[in-house]
Image (cartoon, rainbow, N blue to C red):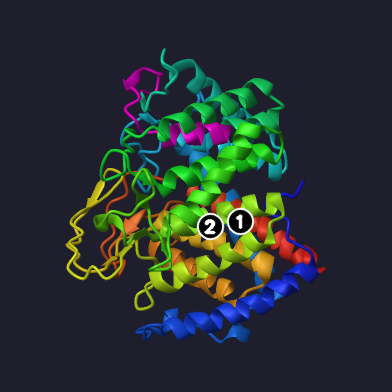
Amino acid sequence: MTHPQDAPSRATRRSFLGSAAAFSASVCADGQQPALANETFAAPTEDEDKFAVAELRTLREEIRAELFERVLPFWEQHGIDHQRGGFMCALNYDGSLNHTDKYHWYQGRGIWVYSYLFNHFGRDDRHLEIARKTKDFLLQHAIGVDGWWAEVLARDGTVLKPFRGDVYGMFCAAEGLQEFAWAAQDDQSRERARQLLKKLFQLVNEPDYKDVYAPQKGYRVQGVWMYLLQACTQYLRRWEDPDLERFAEISVDAIMNKHFNPEIGLVNEYVAFDYSRPPEIANLCLVGHCVQAFWMVLDEALRREDMDLVETCCDRTRRHLDIGWDHVFGGLAEWVNVDQRTHEWGPQQFGDVTVDLQMIGEYNYLKSFWSLNEVMLTTLYIYQLRRSAWAARYFRLARGVVDRKFSRHAQGQATYALAADRKMERIPTGTKQDNYHPPRRMMRNLLSIEQILSEEGTAG
């Protein structure tokens, strides 16, 4: 069965390159790139953009150091509850804790990260034990009598906030449980992940369900489909299940067809329950979510060996980046509301931080760290599959912004700013760290690099 990081054959990849060139021409015909105000972000020529073997080897060592010498030691020292199990993410830049609450998103994500480390990077029993303790903590304390999981737990497991409709933490738990099940050969965790996905699928497809991020009851959210899809794809790569096959098919159709608005060539984050587009949400695109969803559809396309779907994902990724990237100051716009020139965005709530940007117009220029991680993951993945020069260019642009504007490495810290204004000059005080998007991006980047070097006969 095809692993998500496995590339198609060289012959298949060569066929991709011709279509990539054709798509490049069509994008230029649709609209010129904005003039670049800062040569730091200027795009090199197509030939210059291809990765050289030496560059990939250097990149591999830099990412390995970032992951194994800084990020993972930071979490093991500051954010992991080694005694009780679980993750505490309310961390300042120096690792000091603001509080010890355990939010349900970060527990499932932590199980996945450390199980994935075990499965793909050395089978270190220490990593598996961190995942196991977190899993045991959740199963002991989080599950209510109705089968829903508490949204916030105290450090000792006391329920601080029961389930109030935030399904994303349980999608994270299902993803973490299936990855742990493969690492530990734990059938109970596999079955629990399967049943949890079925329970979640039923809830989010009820007409009166109110997603915590949706503007109103009954709206469907792209974020639900991508969380569901990624958990199902990983499960189906290892085990068979007809219900999860159906969920994966429905999720791909939702992301690529029903949420896709052909009038603007972008994916709408919200649609009505019947997939119609009320005017107030018809042109809204959460760009980072789209880029993230596309690599998840790529995983599913490769599992199915559907090369047409691979093509479509790659082409749409480029379009969303061409439109959403800030070609003046760098970074990815958070939202685009196409042709809504007087739209008022208002203060941006980012976790427990409010960023008062007072933006008016089509673009919401909050710059988020999580979205840049998704740009790096997706573009290097596409480069692995297609050797597309534009993908290498956007990878370098995103990495440069992260290194210069979001990383705290220059301050001697292993942490990152999570949000900033357009120029990335107003950086909110760090009150939380992300235990998922950065290590996931680093691990997937390393696997992509190894695959590229292996295909080039230069793995070393």
Identify the image quadrant of residue 325.
bottom left
39 lies left or right of 173: left
Query: Can residue 170 be found in the magenta stretch?
Result: yes
Question: In terms of depth relative to the viewer, which is nearer, 76 or 161?
Answer: 161
Q: Quadrant of the C terminus?
A: bottom right
Query: Can residue 177 be found in the magenta stretch?
Result: no
33 lies left or right of 7: left
Q: From which residue to which does the magenta span run?
A: 154-176
- Marks 2 and 1: CB-CB under 8 Å? yes
Label 2 vs label 1: CA separation? 6 Å
- Residue 84 appears in view: no
Question: In terms of depth relative to the viewer, which is nearer, 430 or 258?
Answer: 258
Question: In terms of depth relative to the viewer, which is nearer, 126 or 341?
Answer: 341
Q: Residue at x 52, y 81 (%)?
A: 26
Q: Position of residue 407 (x, y in %)?
A: 43, 59
Q: Position of residue 9 (x, y in %)?
A: 79, 64
Q: Position of residue 19 (x, y in %)?
A: 64, 76
Query: Looking at the image, is 107 positioned above or below residue 345?
Result: above
Mark 2 highlights which residue? Answer: 294
Identify the image quadrant of residue 454.
bottom right
Mark 1 highlights which residue? Answer: 298
Under mark 2, the amino acid is Phe
Identify the image quadrant of residue 433.
top left
Q: Residue at x 21, y 71 (%)?
A: 341
Question: In terms of depth relative to the viewer, which is nearer, 123 or 186?
Answer: 186
Task: For mark 1, give the secondary structure.
Answer: helix
Task: For mark 2, give the secondary structure.
Answer: helix
Under mark 1, the amino acid is Leu
